[in-house]
Image (cartoon, rainbow, N blue to C red):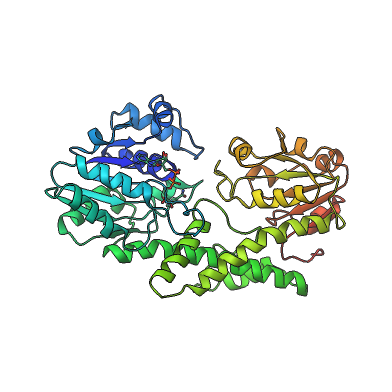
Amino acid sequence: MKIAVVGSGYVGLVTGVCLADFGHEVICVDQDASKIDALSKGEVPIFEPGLEALLEANVASGRLSFTTELAKSVAGADVVFIAVGTPSRRGDGHADLSFVYAVAREVAAAVSGFTVIATKSTVPVGTGDEVARIVRAINPGADVAVVSNPEFLREGAAIEDFKRPDRIIVGMDDERARAVMSEVYRPLYLNQAPIVFTDRRTAEITKYAANAFLAMKITFINEVADLCEASGANVQEVARGIGLDNRIGSKFLHPGPGYGGSCFPKDTAALVRIGQDFGSPMRLVETTAAVNDARKRDMSRKVIAACGGAVEGLTVGVLGLTFKPNTDDMREAPSIDIISDLQHAGARIVAFDPQGMKAAGVVMQDVAFADSAYTAATDADAVVLITEWNEFRSLDLARLKTVMKRPVFVDLRNVYPPSEMRRHGFSYTSVGRPDVE
Ligand code: NAD
């Protein structure tokens, strides 16, 4: 199959590289010339484990290439994937579809022969209809089927997720498109990934419903963690106790500083708006978003309390900035709000993140970046672990304590057993667990 992927960000690039690896002939398109230049030289502009090697191998095989010229890549393609961003529209939380529609217009003008236009971007219900309308208006003779094919990969495990997905959702009303999409994903039959064929609107809602449900699950356990803290129970054990119930499942039951990232915050906000537009309120999702927003402030208060009620003039070492480990993505990371709150309260911040400091430098002010966890902790009055990178799971606690000014450790990911921290002489605060084990 000849495939064009428009938008070479986290989703588009992983999609393009993996589809080339399946044996398809793929061209990745982006309007950002510096990104395409870098990719053409084999440089991957994002941090995603395994991506660089897979990209190199597929470029070398001749199946994968990069361009800024959308029209050329689309002419003759069997499938054009749209994988551009759908950020929150400034001010109202609606998904900003301007990038998707801009691509639809360009693609419409350039298609030749039967072409499937498959939207991978997360888009509100009805967007596929609008893409189809745009194509008809611009190129009435075009033989095109518009398909919804939402993406469920997780940053940090994107290649594994793409190659071994729990499911693939394809929404369409054209039998030829069904055959083309089956062929695109044929290699995955070997991995026994179920393909769910449905209509376009159902596919569009499925993506938002999945993300909102996961956001709700995280938020639920976070509230249970607060209740555990208030009542002397242990949220880890509650999570295990409920997670062993197959109807609930153990994943996404880890309490922490609230969800962030490029998807959950914007997708929950968009789903709330979609519900309002259709007169069908999404009250649980609305509450989830509000509870999650408040949580970040709660976390800075937790740090301040651990420091004895004030951080004015204190130095706080921060371990982990990205919204989760194994990515360099800083979009909507809880660290942004927590750090800004602590700064407002008068703290000086020294931070270390294995991959996120470049992106963090763009979104944070007055943060000193360190070159290791121990440097970030040096002379600190407190250390806060915000993102559970592997290297923060096995810190040399004796060394850490020696370099700190005061041994105050706030663990927002429950990485360490309280008893171990106490044994090392730390004043230790975590999430939803009693101090004594
Ligand atoms: P991103 O911001 O990393 O990448 C988007 C890319 O599209 C950018 O490189 C941008 O330059 C390019 N672009 C924008 N307009 C263009 C145009 N007219 N022509 C060519 N290129 C253009 O975004 P992302 O994180 O990859 O997300 C893309 C979509 O996938 C979003 O809708 C998102 O919600 C969804 N999604 C993201 C993830 C994730 O984990 N990041 C997971 C599932 C779904």
* Residue extending furthest toward the front: 91
- Residue 149 versus residue 402 in the image, above or below: below
Front position in the image: 338 or 318 = 338
Q: Is residue 224 left or right of residue 287?
A: right
Quarter holding the C terminus is bottom right
Q: Quadrant of residue 320?
A: top right
Residue 275 placed where, x, y %? Answer: 43, 70
In the displayed image of the protein, which residue is found farthest to the top?
41
Q: What residue is rendered at 42% in x and 53% in y?
A: 96
Residue 385 locus on image (x, y percent)? 71, 49
- Relative to 247, is 133 above or below? above
Q: Does 106 sit left or right of 319 as displayed? A: left
Q: Is residue 417 visible?
A: no
Q: Is residue 68 left or right of residue 44?
A: left
From the top left corner, tell me how far across and down residue 207 is, in percent: 40, 61
Q: Quadrant of ligand 1?
A: top left
Residue 286 is situated, as x and y percent measured from the top left of the image, at 53, 69
Q: Residue 52 vs residue 172: left or right?
A: right
Image quadrant holding the N terminus, namely top left
Residue 164 seen by the camera: yes
